[in-house]
Amino acid sequence: MLFHKKYFFVFIFLLTVFSGFAQDSKFPTTELKKLDRRKIDSKEILNKEGYTVISFWATWCKPCILELNAISDMYEDWTDEMNVQVVAVSIDDARSSSKVSVFVSSKDWPFEVYLDENSDLKRALNINNIPHSVVVDKDGNVIWQHAGYLPGDEEILFEKLQTLSK
């Protein structure tokens, strides 16, 4: 019986892990802040005519910075070829979020950056670790997610966007 219990727990673990990557769930409504501290509805960050890539990050997360730098380098190609926009959502908390604006201005990223100080959006999307990228279509459906970052992941994301845009 121990043999079967072992596989049962592996199955439950895998089911739990992959449930966070469910396809075609609706993008949630929460409150975000712009870098100037004005509050906005999370749905305002979505591209109403194409796809939105939302990259969750923090100033202290080195892989996040690498991912956003890589996306920044490719961003012009993405917007020339497809109707896609990228937004970065910082999960720095209220104590450290004041550093985000200064940090972002030193990076010269071509996309908008927002603050999720209480991690409400992160929690609503069932995101556990960063970096984490989410692709949302024009109808507000979450259609793809990817956790973590390794060099080259931005190419995988680009290919996924190309496939979706066809």
Image (tube, helix red, strand yellow):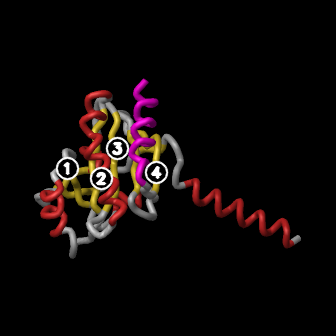
Percent position of residue 60, x then y? 29, 70
The earlier-in-sequence mark between 1 and 2 is 2
> Which residue in the structure is indicated by mark 2?
68
* Magenta segment includes 160: yes
**Disc 2: CA contacts within 10 A as few (<14), some (14-19) or many (>=20):** many
What is the CA distance from the residue labelled 4 to the residue labelled 1? 21 Å
x, y percent for residue 13: 65, 63
Which callout, 1 or 3, points at the residue further toward the start of the chain? 3
At 29% from the left and 40% from the top, the residue drawn is 74
Q: Amino acid at mark 4?
A: His
* Residue at 42% in and 39% down: 141
Q: Residue at x 20, y 52 (%)?
A: 40
Question: Quadrant of the rendered structure where residue 101 is?
Answer: bottom left
Left or right: where 67 falls relative to 22: left
Mark pair 1, 3: CA separation: 14 Å
Q: Which residue is mark 3?
A: 53
Q: CA distance from mark 1 to mark 2?
A: 8 Å
The residue carrying mark 1 is: 109
